[in-house]
Amino acid sequence: TLAEKSGIAKRAFAGACASTLKYAVPSVAQQLIEDTTALHIGDKNSQLSCALLLKNYSNLASDVASGYHSVILPVSAKAIQRLSDVLGESLSVSHQDLLKCLLQEMPGRLWEGKESILHAVAALSTSCHKGMSAEDPSIPNTVIKAVSSACLKKSKSYRDAAYSSLQQVIKAFGSPDSVNVVLPMLLEACSDNKVAQHTIPSASGSTAQGADGMEEERSLPVDKVIDCVAACISVADMKDVMEQRDGLVNVLLYAFSPRFPWTVKVSVLSAVRELFAKFNSFPLSACESPSLELSSFVNEVHVAASECLLDMIKVFQAVSSRQVEEKFKDELLHLLDVEKNEVAKSLLKQCIENCCGHYLENS
């Protein structure tokens, strides 16, 4: 019956399944729900059948279906995400109902697969941000605040998904007003994480696993947070950036710390690029002079970029048997020639040594 193309036959079958679910014993209900949700990974006809069955379960057996939210909701969310990706802005005719459904599921307890709700919100916002903002100017702040709240959850997987989604919704709506709420929260999260890194006790022996688990649970996805910071900078008004300048610089310098891998530093460099692009697009003489030790900050950027480059070269050599291209070696030599910072210069020499096996002083 699932292969039946007739809409009338499909609806009749879905109604019969819903009636069965309403009066089924738990074991049968569980199997029926699992078989239904499994259809979403099939062909288009199977996906349509899945949607129709879930709709009938919700209408005719809502008391039973509500007990299987952790199974049903991820499927519905993934369907919305896929529709958003495929249909794009044309989905705007239904965005209000879809967004309302997703947002009302975000608060409350966590359940396995709840990350799909966040991904669906991000996808829907990316596709329909124009329609959402035009229909209700308060929607961008509503969505961004909801996703920001998800960033405070304790579950690492959910928190990581929240930060990834937050970056997308910030860029999608491009709302300068939202920065006033989000950016201070992001900077505070990094500051709290910096303190936590120093207060988590080191342990050895039988207690090491517990300490590692605690550190993992409390750890912050710094690269994702910095990506959100970069998104904020890109959409913010200059005056708001200036108000947060000291916190911004402290966080960026903190993320340049040697304790973080090159992936974090790539995110930081993107944020720095956004920051200086913002400066370049605005006459600094028209606002308060930034109290930044600019030369020191630039030196930190050069050192971090060189460290990042060295780490990436080492990774490349560890996973690939290919030789580094001569053009890239020439670019390294040019960077070394123009670099003024001695620490960065030393790191670039190491990059060349890793590429060539040696460093030629007269190269």
Image (cartoon, rainbow, N blue to C red):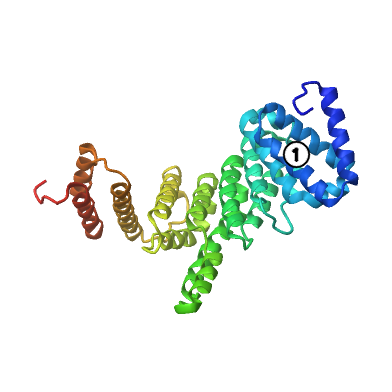
Identify the residue at the far left of this view: 362
Give the image location of residue 234, x and y in percent: 50, 45
In the drawing, does residue 68 fall left or right of residue 241?
right
Neighbor class of circle 1 (other Cα within 10 Å; few <14, some 14-19, many 20+) is: many
Question: Who's the residue at 87% across and 29% down the image?
Answer: 12
Question: Who's the residue at 19% across and 45% down the image?
Answer: 333
Give the image location of residue 87, x and y in percent: 65, 28
Q: How many marks?
A: 1
State the SS at label 1.
Answer: helix
Q: Which of 313 and 140 is in front in this view?
A: 313
Identify the residue at the far top of this view: 6
Question: Who's the residue at 91% across and 46% down the image?
Answer: 23
Residue 160 image-quadrant placement: bottom right
Q: Can residue 335 be seen in this view?
A: yes
Q: Nearer the viewer, residue 34 or 271?
A: 34
Give the image location of residue 130, x and y in percent: 65, 34
Q: Which of 269 and 184 is in front in this view?
A: 269
Where does label 1 land, which residue?
36
In the drawing, does residue 215 fall left or right of residue 315?
right
Q: Is residue 285 visible?
A: no
- The residue type indicated by label 1 comes to Thr
Question: Who's the residue at 70% across and 36% down the image?
Answer: 39
